[in-house]
Image (tube, rainbow, N blue to C red):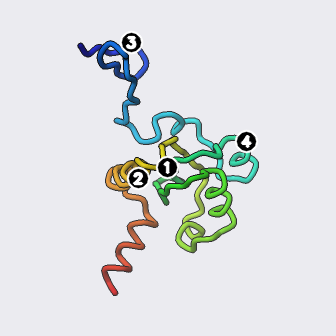
Amino acid sequence: MKRLLPNTGHEAIGEKAMVFVSRTEPFAENRYRKYQFQRESILLNAPESSGVYGLYSALWIHLGEADNIRERLLEHLAADDACIRSYQPSGFAFELVSPPTRSRRLEELVIKLQPLCLRKASERRAAS
């Protein structure tokens, strides 16, 4: 038997009610909270957990995955990537994802959102 849990975006299956998060929308948990890409906001809002993350301004600039989202965002803030630095992201979003499924989730997001910096990197590789 399959039933939907009302107003949760979750689905329950069988008697043990295994719950799965619906992933129809990128970064559904916090995309519209508009976390600022600044040190204080990262320290306050980004988890020290496994997951995927995105940097944006008007467009998605960069998507990535990390064992520790907070630590990786702080590295990006320190301007560790020229492409990210040139687009000057204003915000970030994240989604908690376990390490075994993180890469697959990142691939889904890259296909859907087409971030500027990953696209630039793939274009550079194709040209060489």
Q: Residue at x 50, y 34 (%)?
A: 29
Q: How many numbered tags mark residues here?
A: 4
Q: Residue furthest left?
A: 1
Q: Residues within 10 Å of mark 2 (few under 14, many from 20)?
A: some
Pair 4/2: label in front: 2
Q: What amino acid does circle 1 point to?
A: Val
Taking the image as shown, residue 16 lies to the left or right of residue 1, namely: right
Q: Name the side, left or right, on which 128 lies relative to 88.
A: left
| Element under disc 1 | strand
Is residue 61 visible in the rendered image? The answer is: no
State the CA–CA distance, disc 1 to disc 2: 6 Å
Sooner in the amino-acid sequence: mark 3 or mark 1: 3
Give SS at disc 2. Answer: helix
- Disc sitting over residue 44 in the figure: 4
Residue on which disc 3 sits? 6
Q: Residue at x 47, y 40 (%)?
A: 27
Asked if one can make out residue 65 in the rendered structure from this viewpoint, the answer is yes
Confirm or deny contact between disc 3 and disc 1 (CB under 8 A): no
Q: Are marks 1 and 2 in contact (CB under 8 Å)?
A: yes
Tell me what residue is drawn at x 32 percent, y 15 percent.
Answer: 4
Marks 3 and 1, how far apart at CA: 27 Å
Q: Which mark is residue 52?
A: 1
Q: Which residue is mark 2?
A: 106
- Identify the residue at image location x=48%, y=43%: 97
Amino acid residing under circle 4? Leu
Task: Give the Cα separation between the discs numbered 1 and 4.
Answer: 17 Å
Mark 2 and mark 3 in contact? Answer it, CB < 8 Å: no
Marks 1 and 2, the one that precedes in the sequence = 1
